[in-house]
Image (cartoon, helix red, strand yellow):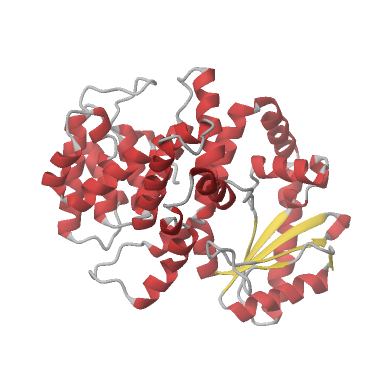
Amino acid sequence: MGDYSMDLVSEENPDTTWKSLRRELPKNYTPQDVEFVQRAFRVAAEAHNGQARKSGEPYIKHPVMVAAYLAELRLDAKAVAAALLHDVAEDTPTNVPALAELFGQEVASLVDGVTKLKEMTELAALPISSRDPRIESYRKMFLAMVSDVRVVLIKLADRLHNMRTMNSMTSEAQRRISRETLQIYAPLAGLLGIYRVKWELEDEAFQYLDPDTYADIARNLNERRAEREAYVESICETIKIELGRLGVQADVRGRPKHIYSIWRKMQRKGVQLAQVYDQHGVRIIVPEVSDCYAALGTVHTLWRPIPGEFDDYIANPKENQYQSLHTAVIGPEGKPLEVQIRTHEMDRVAEVGIAAHWRYKQQASRDETYERKIAWLRSVLDWQSQAKAEGNEFLDALQEDLFKDRVY
C-alpha cells in the first residue's frame, strides 16, 4: 500500500481532497467512472462530516486512504467507490438500502460485505463450539468472499491503514488489534497472494506484540545496513554481467527485509539472526520463463547451492498462483545468500496477488483467460460444499486452509 501524503485529506477544503484522490485514479477510467467515484466521495464526506478518529484527524481521511490503495491496485470504479463508503453504513445514519438507491446494488453489497467481515475478528478470537450460532455467520462471511473478492481487498486496505495509525490507541487495544491482524488478516493476504500487504501487516502487528524483539532485530539490521547493501549490490552486479553474456536482460535487486518473517525463520530453525539466510537476499526478474532457468544455472555456477533449499514454484505454483524459483547458495565471503528468480508478470502477481486479476477493464465482459485466472480462488475458498457440515468439521477445515502457517 503506497505511503500517500498526509496532505491527501483537507478537512477545510473537500475539493482539495478530491483533487488529490482524483490523481490516484487509474488513467483508463472513463469520465463516467470518475464522476461515479466523485459522487461516492461527496456522500462519504458529508456522512462523516464532523467525525474524528481517535488521533483527532478528520474521519474522512481513513476511507480516502483506503480508496487510494484500491485505486493504486487499479480496481474498478465501483470498488473504489465502495472503499470510500465502507464505513458509512455502520458509522452514520446512511444505511445499505440508501446506498443501493444512490449507487446501485453492487456497491451496496460490497459495503455490506465489508461490514460483515468485521465480525470475523471477534469470532476468531473466541473458542467456538459446534452448537454456537456464530458458526453460521462464519460460513456466510467466507461464502461472501467467494462471490466477490473485492470485499476482502477493501477490508485488507482498511486494516492496513488502521495498523499504520494506532498510535493514539491504548496499549491493550493495540495488542488486541495486532493479534487479530496476525490471526486473520495477514494469513488472508497471503492466501490471496498479496504479499506486500501480508508482510507489512505482520511487521506492524509484531512491533506492538513484541516490541523488544522487534526493536532488537530492527537495530541489528540497521547497524549492518551499509555493509549489507554494499555486499548485495556487488552480487547484483555480478549476476547482471553474467546474464548479460547470455543475452538475458535482467533486473537484479536486493530484497526488502521483513522483521516478522526473519523472526519466524529464527524460531522455526532454532537459529540466531546471523544464521537466517534471507538476511542477504536478491531477486532476479527476467523477461521469459526460459530466462528464469538460465538465471538459476548462472547462480548455481557462480556459487555453491545449499542442499534442501531449492523450490520450483514455476513448475509447481503455490495455490494462490505464486510462481518463482527459490534457491540458496553460499555466496562471497562464505555468507548464505537467498535468491528468488521470476518473470515480470510473476513479480506483478507476487506483489498484488488476486488483485492483479481484478484490474479495471473497460469492457463489460470478462474473457475466458480472466475467468481461468481467478478460478483458483473459488477452488481454494469453496465453502459451499462445507456449508452443511457440522460446526467442528467446518472450523477444522477453516483453520487448516486459512490459518495454517503460510509464511513465505
Residue 273 place in picture, x, y as percent: 79, 41
The residue shown at (82%, 74%) is 301
Nearer to us in this view, 186 or 129: 129
How many numbered tags mark residues here? 0
**Left or right: residue 391 compared with residue 44:** right
Q: Is residue 175 visible?
A: yes
Nearer to us in this view, 78 or 131: 131
Residue 26 figure quarter: bottom left
The residue shown at (27%, 63%) is 28
**Left or right: residue 400 compared with residue 270:** left
> Relative to 39, is 150 above or below?
below
**Left or right: residue 46 compared with residue 160:** left
**Left or right: residue 201 compared with residue 161:** right
> Relative to 181, is 102 above or below?
below
Residue 143 place in picture, x, y as percent: 38, 52
The residue shown at (83%, 42%) is 271
Residue 103 place in picture, x, y as percent: 15, 48
